[in-house]
Image (cartoon, rainbow, N blue to C red):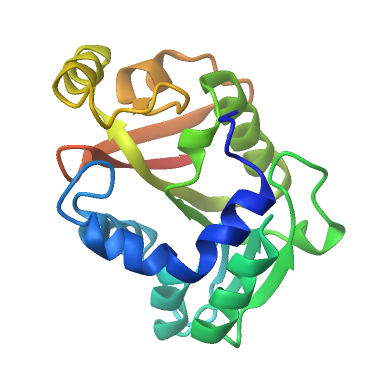
Amino acid sequence: MTPERNPEFFDRWAAEYDWFVEGWANSFPFEGYDKLLSRIVELADPQPGMMILDMGIGTGNLAERFIEKECEVWGIDFSGKMLEEAKKKVPSAHLMQVDILADWPSELKTGFDRIVSAYVFHHFNLETKLKIIEKMLSELLRDDGAIIIGDTSYPSFAARANARTELLDVWDDTEFYWAADEVKLMPWGKGAHITYEQVSSCGGVYLIAPA
C-alpha cells in the first residue's frame, strides 16, 4: 500500500483533483485519461437498469458516464471529501464511505452486473490487488458479470522497466504500477478470464470475468 493512501491525503486533494488530472492529461501518469475512461465504459457495455459499482469513485468522473447510460450506480470511496465532489456530478448515485481494504457493508453484497474502477489499484501491491479482485468475484459480482479496471499499466515487465528508466524524474517507486504479464501469471483461486488492452503509453484496461 502506498504511503499517501489515507483519507486525509485525498480529502486535501479532492477540490483540485479534476483540475490536476486535466493538467496532466497528456503526461504520465494520466496520459490518455479520457480515452481510458471511455474504454472502460465500452467494455462494460452498459444497458439501462444495470447495477454498476465504482470502486474508488473519487470525484465521479467514471460514474457520471454510467449515469448517462441510465444505469443504477453505486460508488465507494474512503475519502469523504471525494464523495462530496462526486455527489455534485452524480446526485442519483448511491455513495458510501468505505475503505476497499476493510470489511464491505452488507448493502454491497447484492450482486452487481459490472464492477469498474479507474486509477485506484496502483496503490496496492500485486498480492493485495489479487485479494481484492478475488473478493469482488466471490462476493459482489453476478455470475455473468465482469470487472473492468483501468489504471497506470504496461503490457509487460520489460515495458514497465523501460518506462521507469525513461520517466525516472516523475516515476513514484512507492506506487505499484501494473504489468499485464505479471497479472496473468498470478494464480487465481476462483479462476478468472483476463484480457488486457493498452490504451495509452502508460495506461491500460483489464477485463476480468468469472471462469
Residue 2 x, y percent position in the rendering? 56, 30
In the displayed structure, would residue 168 be above or below residue 7? above
The one of 84 and 53 positioned closer to us in this rendering: 84
Query: Residue at horizontal 24%, vertical 61%?
Result: 23
Query: Residue at horizontal 34%, vertical 68%?
Result: 19
Residue 198 visible to an observer of this rendering? yes
In the displayed structure, would residue 64 be above or below residue 16? below
Number of callouts: 0
In the displayed structure, would residue 103 be above or below residue 132? below
Residue 38 visible to an observer of this rendering? no
Query: Residue at horizontal 63%, vertical 20%?
Result: 189
In the displayed structure, would residue 86 be above or below residue 189? below
Give residue 55's quadrant in the image.
Answer: bottom right
Residue 206 x, y percent position in the rendering? 36, 40
The one of 168 and 54 positioned closer to us in this rendering: 168
Residue 103 x, y percent position in the rendering? 83, 44
Residue 39 x, y percent position in the rendering? 26, 57
* Quadrant including the N terminus: top right
The one of 128 and 3 positioned closer to us in this rendering: 3
Q: Is residue 205 left or right of residue 84?
A: left
Query: Residue at horizontal 39%, vertical 60%?
Result: 44
The one of 180 and 90 positioned closer to us in this rendering: 90
Q: Is residue 26 left or right of residue 82?
A: left
